[in-house]
Image: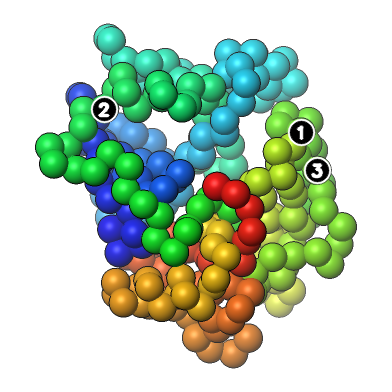
Amino acid sequence: QKMGFSAVARHRSRDVLLYRQGSMNLIVNAHPDALPGLSSPGSTPALAAIALRVRDAAYAHRRALELGAWDIPTRASAMELNIPGIHGVGDSLVYFVDRHGDFSIYDVDFVPLAGADPRPPALSGLHYFGVVQAILVDRTADWLDFYRSLFGFSVLPQGKYFGILPRGTLLESPCRKFYLQLIEPPPGSEEIHWDEGLVRLGLGARDIPAATRALQERGIAFVDRGTVQPSQKGALTQAYLAGVNFELVVSHLKP
């Protein structure tokens, strides 16, 4: 909520809430059996899954499996939508969604919260920009092949980056509205425990200083040390509950 999201609906049968602001939908899943690898006692919040909007979810899922992706078993109960998906990096999942506009996947499985605005506006024009994925040493080529062959992502030229953390390899979605940043462990970090997984969520905004101020007024703290500090290009929030953090990136994309 401090990041500007508002709870708008609750899942019909599980401990799951739908949060929204502007064009962004974010699901907070506290269901015990959500993801076994990420829901052990004492575990910190994690980016457990992303949903990619496609023209035909069934076809995209089938093609991904034909190309070698690992299927995930359905978790849908009676009268719930079965959303196709595959295994992603680490314990995360990738879902394929083709319902949007006047009728979305949330209209079936979620019940609106009484009194909640179903379409809360975006704070400072925030919109989804991308995700950052940590990978193991010398695994860049493997993950490039994964995202290029299964999803049609393309690699941006070396040296082209967004935000204030210019590292790793950047990939662009076919629609040119979503980005993936792959980062290997930095040199000299052999003693650091480094797992593969989704580690950061990127949010775009036209005016980063204005977005930073608006979030600070809501209690969000930003990293401000060394070369990582809020600027016109971007800003990085401190990790919340020792888990996920958010990166603001200057963006002129239309949400």
Rendered image: mark on residue 110 = 2
Give the labeled residue for mark 3.
154
Where is residue 117 drawn, in percent x and y?
24, 43
SS label for mark 1: loop
- Look at mark 1 in the image and give the residue it sits on: 152
Dot 1 amino acid type: Gly
Which of marks 2 and 1 precedes in the sequence? 2
Q: Position of residue 53 (x, y in %)?
A: 57, 30
Quarter that holds the N terminus: bottom left
Residue 173 lies left or right of residue 73; in this view the side is right
Q: Are marks 1 and 2 in contact (CB under 8 Å)?
A: no
114 left or right of 183?
left
- In the displayed structure, 171 sits above or below 167; it is above
Amino acid type of the residue that numbered disc 2 sits on in the rendered structure? Phe
Q: Residue at x 54, y 63 (%)?
A: 205
The answer to which of 121 and 40 lies nearer the viewer is: 121
